Each structure stands twice: as structure tokens, then as C-alpha cells.
Image: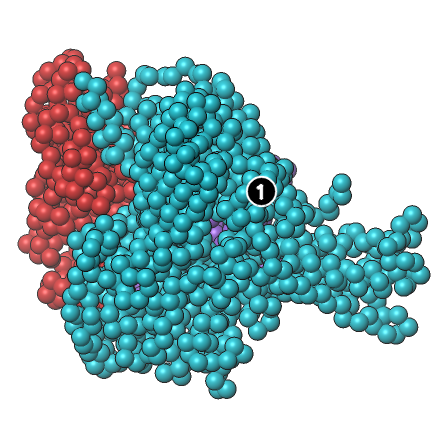
Chain colours: A cyan, B red, C purple
Amino acid sequence: MTAFSIIGKSVKRNDLIDKVTGSAKYVADMQFPGLLYGKTLRSNVAHARILRIDASRALALPGVKAVLTHSDVPRVLHAGSPHPRSASLSCDQYILDDKVRFWGESVAVVAATSEEIAEEALGLIQVEYELLPAVFTVEEALRPGAPLVHDLGPGGNQVLDPVTCQRGDVEKGFQEADLILEGDYEGGRPVPAYMEPNVCTCQWDPTGGLTVWISTQTSFMVRGIMAEVLGLPLNKVRVLVDHMGGGFGAKQDLFQTEFLCALLARKTGRPVRMEFTREETFLGGRTRHPARIWLKQGFKKDGTITARQARIVYTSGAYGSHGPGVTNVGTTALASLYRCENIHVVGSCVYTNTPIAGAFRGFGVVQAYYALDIQMDEAAVALGMDPAELKLRNAVREGDVAPSGHPLIGHGLEDCIRRGKEEVGWEALRSRERDEHGPVRRGWGLGCEMHGSSAYPGIKEQGNAIVKMNEDGTVVLFTGTAGLGTGTHTVQAQIVAEEIGVTFESVSVVHGDTDAVPWDIGAFASHTTYMGGRVAQMAAAEVKAQLVARAALQQAVDPSQIEVRDGVVSVKGTDRSVSVREVMMPKRGIPAPQFVGSATYHPTKSYSFAAHFVEVAVDIETGAVKVLQVVPVHEVGKVIHPVAAAGQIEGGIQQGIGHTLYEDFQIDLKTGRSLNPNFVDYKMPLFMDMPTIRTVLLETAPDPGGPWGAKGIGEDPIVAIGPAIANAIYDAIGVRFHHYPIKPEQVLAALQEREGGAQ
Amino acid sequence: MKSFDYFEPHSLEEAVGLQQQGQGRGCWLAGGTDLLVQMKEHVRQPGLVINLKKIRGLDDFHFDSVTGLRLGALVTAREVETSPLAHQHYAGLARACTDFASIQVRNRATVVGNICRASPSADTLPPLLADDASLCIHGPRGTRTVALEGFCTAPGRTILAPDEIVTHVLVPAPAPGTAKVYLKHGRREQMELATVGVAVSLTMSRGRCSRLGIVLGAVAPTPLRVPTAEALLLDEEPTRDRVHAAAAAAAQACQPISDVRASAGYRRQMVEVLTRRALVQALEVLR
Amino acid sequence: MNQVINLTLNGEPRTLMVACHRTLLDTLRLEGGLTGTKKGCDVGECGSCTIIMNGKLVNACLVLAVEANGAEIITIEGIQRSALELHPLQENFIKYGAAQCGFCTPGFIVAAKALLDENPRPTIDEIRFAMAGNICRCTGYTKIVQAVDETAREMQENGREAL
């Protein structure tokens, strides 16, 4: 086995010095002479036709430079998330429409010389609406004759035609079952709540070129759709992304502000910045898809699953955004995780007059596996088995067909469960004596998941990288991968350095400029290491071949005799060695040619696995649940940067605890108004609410599609933690919850209901 | 925020004069942690903002075992939180000052500001009311002292006239054998607005409860003192049953609403749990 | 209404003309050129704009710029020991992975500095309590505790060595 020089080491991340000193420039930090501030007027009705907009008073306000309404902007139908290689898009948005479809939708924009003036101007715009009947829930949207949110698509408020995932014969499977469980499960409406509100700045140059500084995960997608909608060639749209303050999937979309910002800049001839307020990140941002899941499974006495049938309905909100992708991924996910030969799952996605659901870490799978893993726990209780044993027995493994249609590699899930059991002393915990004194009850739970790296097959993925070696032997990687904050540029630099055989410090990374780096599909789907890292490795290998050829020539040996490691080139079996720098130095006055490697990679998909072991404390008098500790065990193929990998897991757990116990973006079901679009009432767990986390990383099922077997890690943790908590609550108080977030008053009500039933 | 005129008077008279010139369109600024948010959200749009920080004597923080505690209008929550004296004699208030918002906010937010904001969920009001606090008010007609009880009249409303300033809050010295507790219910450990707050100030003498204040926060338009609950323990031995009965009476007396934070029914249940726990905790302190 | 204010920004005396209705946060960012202090919510709920004002930790979004007249302000840009030397907190935030997207990081580092100035050897719970007003959405806080705790330990050891 090769010993690694750089892979597996937590090198100093190359983006953090700027971040810890405050010198990192995020989009809102960039100063422009003559900058104007753009602000959005948002609707205060949920579904209406706009009859009239009077902006004259706003335009008359000193300092206001432009106002745009739907009649001032190009009317081009486009997808909110226009992934160019996606199999399913919902093309249902205009830059501004003469209709609003949710409370908080953009109606008009203003550009002014200060934020205060722009804000004042918004208050001076008068909008006359003709109210339309609205639908706020799945039930309302699917009722026969329900008002339609859109006139396009399959109709009946469906975002796409229902997706079916089928194999075997479920009827036969249920007939063979000794135990049949059936239940309804429900996922709420959490939001990503990235710390940096959405922001972009647009500026036109005299040649008609547009530059966009933006906080996005998908700069090339932004370039593509802006060019299309604004009618520009790609070389006239330059999108720049340097540091960004988180995205968690949601910053894959366009938020209409990008187009409007460009149009305001064009109209005023000045740079314009549009920055969301925190409230706007709720209203105009993206949420996770609320979901209803009906799940039925059959089990043999020994725990074997004989059939699985499910219907899953996602709520898309007012636009389709990632609805098709989420529906496909979530539906097919239910065919996996726990083995079953007879499967019938139907997934659908429904429009409602509510804020838009989009891509968000865990992409449809959070909801699906919350239901599936909890029902496994229920089955274990019903069968009198240890849930860990039941899950182990049914864990998918080597050769099983994955949701992507490919055979799975290795035994990652089983490895995670086994290792976690050892870490927490599961057997002893199961048989421990329960402390029934006082109002606090403790419980342990296990939650499992698997998640794909890359969006294949829904998106035909493509990764690109260019690597060049400078004349002193240092290396530059050009990548389109956006740096959301995960440390991906460090990881890719590690991979390039390891592949070529130079030090980590001698590799720098150019990213975030669509004019300079090769095309990139975006940073999402847990694929930046798996795909971005792998393609960087492929490009680096090309440079290495050129380096080795030059060294071999210099040393007069066959290239196969050359070894490069830590910046040193040596001839195998001899003590001859020179530095990479020396190899690259001019020879007889002639400099080395420019070594450039480039690569394109079309990956399929790999799967990572996790088992989370969680301890909770439940106060049976108040219903409050506190997560005391989490032991997450993740199988990721190969760990490139242990600290960064653990950071992904810990952060995902924090968000997952939030979704499961605290976070709930609430919509008034009478008016569609958002009730808590702020950090006062949208409760995320904070420092004091977080448990201790003891992360375990496994490398037992490497995937050949990733660099040295590495797979994704970004989304996995948020999937496993939810059911683990719900199962731990059951263990603590014997009450089963099928929904999230599980709020204290629901816990208390359930306890009292049980008490009442018992009396 | 909309633009406004800004002044930093050096005396109470000057401050009141500015307010009168501004025809009551002015806002006092002490900590500013509520005012700035309200201005940003257009809840208040004052024509002038009068910063009280330059006025002498308003940073008074004085304790005397006979006259009690005297807090000036500029004393911050963090000053109370970090004061050993406050912890010793006004544990409920100290807890309330520790439990709200963040250190960043508590370094600015003042106790008097929290009182004058008159939020139903204000943390400092229940413990102050339980301790029979009073307020010194300065206005064009001189200075008056009023009981804190009755000061808040509705959410965000008080008896204060626009040209009046609360200069101090006064809290009587605790009698020997007194314990004070403030318990707050919220979803998070910190950075939380109370779903329910319960303050108890309890004095025991010769095995009986000789003085008791039970005040509930966030379950009525203004913080609610519950004499019906207090009566069940006053002059009595605080047995388990009486404590439970008092807690039930508190739950009976409150008038909670349902909102995005909790339902009325849940709030009422929490009043009972927290009142009981607060009483038990106070009795434990005295044991 | 505008007003001239004099203040010390990271040790440097500065004179700024400010609008009375502008916050210190916007002033630092727009007039002061100090964009390390971030706007995450603008209502004192996230801690991204945490600065030290006259020795006290505050949210710059909840202070009027005019109130900073005569004040001594330390922002993230004033934490570094010199142009070339990072503060140990900064070193450890890098080393322990206490920053990811980095947007909340300046606020956390300033809050951590204020904590260590006041309490050089805080317990883990004291660290968590002191930073309860700072939201991080990436790290799960685990590595932030580690970085602050490790810094306190190091600074104490180095302090002893210096004696």
C-alpha cells in the first residue's frame, strides 16, 4: 500500500487566513465607485394578479435612480435552477411576472444611492392586486378543482408527473410477511439559514460585457442563464465568486435578483448591488421541501423485509426549482438503505402558494430516510429485536442495486453500525437500568443513511480541471468548483500535490472566475471531492507525465524508472535525486516548455454511509428534548483532510438537530404570510444547545470513481441524525414521533395522551 | 432606518426640554438594543433620538442593606449579571439579566429599558415585580416615585408620558430568610425570548411563608402577579401540597395567547410546572 | 442630520462624518473600510457584527455610529498582533478547523478575544456561554470550543514561560 505524503493530513486550509483576519472579501464587502443599492419590493399577498403598479412617487424621491416592474423587464420563461445537464427542469419562472404566487415574491426593484433611500422608495410604490384564491397545503392543492398556481406543467398543481420506482412484486411480498407496519410520516419546512445573506453586484463595461459578483454555488449556471435571458454571448458574461458565506445547496438557484441587478445596472449605467436582508433570505430564499410520506413494509419474523410500498409527496412551494430532482432522488432512495426485493414507491411534488422549496443538503433523502429508519426502529420493537441488529441484518451491501442503478461497492453501512455499537457500548446501553427518578428520562437511538456523491443519473455530471506547472516546479490548479466554506480548494490542492509528488504548499488554486477556469457544473450533491477532486487528480497526472518524461530524458533513464515525491525526483534503485525545481530549470539556456494538464470527467455515482448513535434527555414535565451526545460513524472511502471531513459531519449534525427539534419556518395557512422569517423566532440550536460529538471516520469501502477511493461527505450527516434523535426519544419515553420538528409541546401532549389512555 | 435628529443632553432638564421642543416625537435612547431594532423595522420612527448616556447619575448602581437596590437608567443587564451583590440579594433579577439575549446585547441593554419596553415577555419585570420594586420618574413637573406594579398597561405601553424619564428603579432590601428564583422557559438555552417566565420571591420566618411574590411573564398582556397563588402559601407552612396548589392557581390565573412560539394551552401548563419548580427551588435555597 | 465623530479604530485615531441614523456597523463597513465585521441579520441575533467597544463586546448593528464618538473600537482587523503575526486565536481557528465559510468567524474571534481578556482560562461551559450570541451554521461549534480552549491553554503556558 502506498504511504501518502499529503492525503489524510489536515494541512492548513488555504482560505482560512483571509477569513480569520477579516480580510476575506465577500460580495457585500467589495467597494465600487458610484455603487447603487438595489432593493426588492415583495408582495404582501399570496396569490394575485397585479393590476397596476405606480412607481412615480418612488422615482421622484431624490437619490432614486431606477425602478423596474414586470413591464420593464424581458419576459423570458426559465427554470429557477437551470442546471444545463439536468434531465428534469421545471421551467416556470419569469424575472418578474404580472402575477404573484406567494407572499413575499418580488414585485418591483429600486436602485438608489443609499440603502436607506432605496428602502424608503419601496414604501412609495403602490401596487394594486386582484386577489386570486390560493392553496397553502398539499390537501388544498390536490383537491379537485383547486386553484392552479401555474398554467403549465402536467396540471393539477403537479410540478412533474409522478415518479415510480418499482421492482419485484409488493403484493406477493406482503403476503409472505409475518408483520406488516404502515404509517404516515411528515417532514417540516426548515431553511438553510446560511450566514451570508444572498448578494450580487452587477456592472456593465463599455463593450457591453456584464460582470457579476455573486454568492453562488453554481457560477457557470448563473453565467449560462443570465446570458440566455439577457441575450448575451457567454464571453460577455463574467461571473466571479471568491469567498461565500455558506449555501448548503440553496445557493444553486437564481433568486431573480441576479437578472434584476443586471438590468438595474444597465438602466443606470452604474454598478448595482442587491443584498438580501435576513428576512428576505426566508421569503425569497429556498426551504427544504416539506413532505408527507406513507410507508408500509412487510417483515419476516427474523427481520427480513419482504415488501416496501410508499407514497411520498413533496411540497415545492410556488415554483418548481429543484422539485423534480428532489422527487426523483427521494423516491429512488426509498428503494435502498435496507434491502428489499419487492418495492413500489411513488413520488410526487406539488405546487402551493408558499415560499419556494429548493435544493438543500440531504436533497429529498432527509425526508425519505426519516420515515424509513424510524419505521425500522418500530419494526425492531414489534419483532422484539435490537434495532441495530435489525438494521445490520437488512443493511444494503456489496452488489446490491443502488438508487442510481449501479451495484454498491463494499459493506459501508454494516461497518458503520458495527463500529458505532462498539464505540458507544451498545449492548450494555440496551440492557442498562433506567433512572426513573425526577422529570428527566434518557434514551439512545440509532439512525442510518446512505447518500450519493454526484447528482447522477438526474444530472449527467461533468467535472473539468486544468493544472499547470510553473518553471520553478510550483503548480497551479484551475478549478470551477465553488468554495462554499467546506475547504474544497485545499482538498483539491492536496490531491494535485499528492498526485504529482510536490509539496502541498507548492500548489495554488485559481477558482471563481468563469473567464479563467474551466466550466464547472457547480458545488453540490456531495461531489466536490469525488468529482472535482478526481478530475483535478486526472489533470495533475498529465502534468506529472510531462515532468517525468523531462526528468527521464535528463537522467537518461526510462520514464518508468522515475519517482516523484515531496518535490524530489529520484531514479528508482539508485541514490540519484534532484528537486522538481531543478528538473524544470532551463537547460542549455532553454526553459522547460509550459506543462499543462487538463481533464474532463463524467462520473457516475458513489455512495457514502453513516450510522449515528445519539443520546437524548427528555423532560417529561415540559416536553423539552436535549441532545446530550452524538457518535457519528461515517464511511467515506478515503479521508483527504480529516479536520475538514469532521467539520462537515459536525456542521451537518447541528443543522439536523435543528430540523428535528427546533427549526420550523411557519406559514399562516389562511393568508400564506410567513410567520417567523427571522432569527428571533426561527430557532436554530446555538452553542449552548449543541451536544458533544465524537466523530468516527471509516475508509472501508473506497469507490474507484473518486480520488484514491474518496467519496462525498457533505450531505450524509444531516440525513442520519434525524431518525437517530426520534428513535432515541422513543427509547427515553416510549413515545413514537413520525414528524419533524418534534416540539416540546407535542412531546408533552403525547405523554399526556398516553397517560390519559392508560388511566 | 429613517433619518432623525440626535441629541446628547447633559441633564434631565435638558432632556425633557428637548422632548418638549420635539413635541413628543422623540425617543429616549439608553441601551438602544430594542429601539434600534424597532426603528429598523419601522415600528417606531422618531423625529429625534435623545441619548441619555451623558446625563450624570443615571449610571447609579447602589445597594444598601436598609434601603435596598437603586439602579440608574443606564445600568446594563450585564452589570447586574456580573454583580455579586445582585446575585446575593436579587438572585431572580440576576438570573433574568443572565438569561436574555447575548453578552453583546446585555452589554448595552439596560434594566430600565427592559422595563420601559413593557414587553409581555420582558425578563426583568417578573423578578422586579415579585420584589415590589418602584420607579423614580422625572418629568416637567418634577420627580415622582411609582410602584412598578401598574406601570405597564399593555404590550409596549406604560403610564409614562412622552416627556418623562424613568431615572431609577428601586428594589427593597430583602428580609432575612428570603430566596428569589427566576425560571424561564424557551426552546434554547440562551438567545431566547421567554415562552413563559416565572419569578418567585419568598421569605420564610419561623417555618411559615411570611412574604411571597409570584409573578408570571409572557402569559398575559403585562407581567402578572398572582395573589390567588400567593394566598395559598402566605402564613402557611409550605408543604408539598400547598406548593402544588399554588402552582395550579398560577396556571388558573394566567391569560396566555397562542403564537408562533407556543400555544396558550402549553403556556398554561408551563406556568404550573415552572411555578412549582421555582417555589421548590426557593425553598431548597432556604433549607 | 450628520455629525462628525472622533474615535479610535483599532488603535488609530479617526474622524468620520456620519449620518445620525446610521449604525456603527454600516459606518465601519462603508466609511471605515473595515468589512471584516459582517452583517448577518442586522438585529442583534447572529453576532456576525461583534466588535469590542470601550472594552465591551457589542453588536455593531445595535449601536448608532454617533454613539461611538470618543469610543475605542476593536474589530477583527485589530486582532492580529502585527502585519505578519496572527493572534493565537486566529492560528487555532485555522488549525482546528473552527472556520468553514468564514462569515461568522470574525465575530467569533472577537468574542473569544473578549472572553480571554476577561477570563484567561475559561471552562468549556464558560466558552459556550460566552459565545451563545454568535451563530455559526457550518461547524456545529465543536471545533470552535476546541480552538478557544486550546488558545487559552497555550496562552497561559506561554505566559508562564515568559515569566
Quarter-of-image position of residue A88: bottom left
Whether residue B212 appears in this view of the structure is: no
- Do we see residue B23 in this rendering? yes
Q: Position of residue A254 (x, y in %)?
A: 40, 65
Q: Work out whether A95 lies above or below A410.
A: below
Q: Residue A654, how many percent across, how many down?
A: 43, 42
Residue A2, x across and y down, in percent: 76, 43
The chain ID associated with circle 1 is A
**Relative horizontal placement of residue A244, taking residue A134 as reference (left or right):** right
Query: Residue A53 placed where, x, y %?
Result: 20, 76
Which residue sits at x=38%, y=63%?
Answer: A90
Identify residue for label 1: A408
If the image is split into quadrants, where does the C terminus of chain A sit? top left
Q: In front here: C150 or B188?
A: B188
> What amino acid is labelled 1 in the image?
Leu
Residue depicted at x 40% and y 37%? A170
Q: Quadrant of the N terminus of chain A?
A: top right
Left or right: where does residue A607 sit relative to residue A496?
Answer: left
Left or right, A116 with reference to A705: left
